[in-house]
Image (cartoon, rainbow, N blue to C red):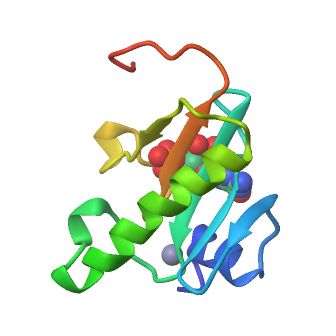
Amino acid sequence: MADCLFCRIASGEARADRVYEDDFAVAFRDINPAGPTHILIVPRKHIATLADLTPEDDALVGHLHRVAVTVAHADGRRDFRLAVNCGADAGQSVFHLHLHVIGGRPLAWPPG
Ligand code: 5GP
Ligand code: ZN
């Protein structure tokens, strides 16, 4: 989608501090980090929200989770938080599915 920020980052059209990529996913540092490590993992496929997943995406979702562990470990984080905001009231501001990997500081629960 031409007007989607994370599609443009995934394709390379928009710049980002990329830390990982493969045929299905791209990971890059959040521009406004919530901790020493804050990496976003996005599918190359445009999916607006978690609620838009279909059964054909099941393998992709598993892959995104494994990429999250890979990039967390590569950043030296054995303990980290994985978060997905689904919908505006939950804090989603970019409507292309993304996993947040946050770590490098103590993390309170529940989040705000
Ligand atoms: P959401 O609020 O949708 O769960 O998360 C969107 C995230 O994208 C936010 O943490 C925000 O800081 C990040 N973000 C927004 N625009 C950009 C950008 O242009 N580049 C990067 N690297 N991150 C962005
Ligand atoms: Zn998109």
Quadrant of image for the C terminus: top left
Q: Position of residue 39 (x, y in %)?
A: 64, 48
Decide which of 25, 72 is in the foreground and name it.
72
Eyeballing the image, is 19 above or below 60? above
Q: Position of residue 73 (x, y in %)?
A: 65, 45
**Residue 92 falls left or right of residue 4:** left
Q: Is residue 80 visible to us here?
A: yes
Q: Position of residue 35 (x, y in %)?
A: 67, 27
Tally the numbered discs: 0
Q: Residue at x 53, y 51 (%)?
A: 69
Q: Position of residue 108 (x, y in %)?
A: 44, 12
Q: Is residue 93 visible to us here?
A: no
Q: Residue at x 53, y 86 (%)?
A: 1
Eyeballing the image, is 95 above or below 54? above
**Residue 100 falls left or right of residue 57:** right
Q: Which residue extends farthest left?
A: 55
Q: Residue at x 53, y 32 (%)?
A: 80
Decide which of 88, 17 is in the foreground and name it.
17
- Residue 41 sits in which quadrant? bottom right
Q: Residue at x 71, y 38 (%)?
A: 32
Eyeballing the image, is 29 above or below 3? above
- Residue 12 sits in which quadrant? bottom right
- Residue 106 sits in which quadrant? top right
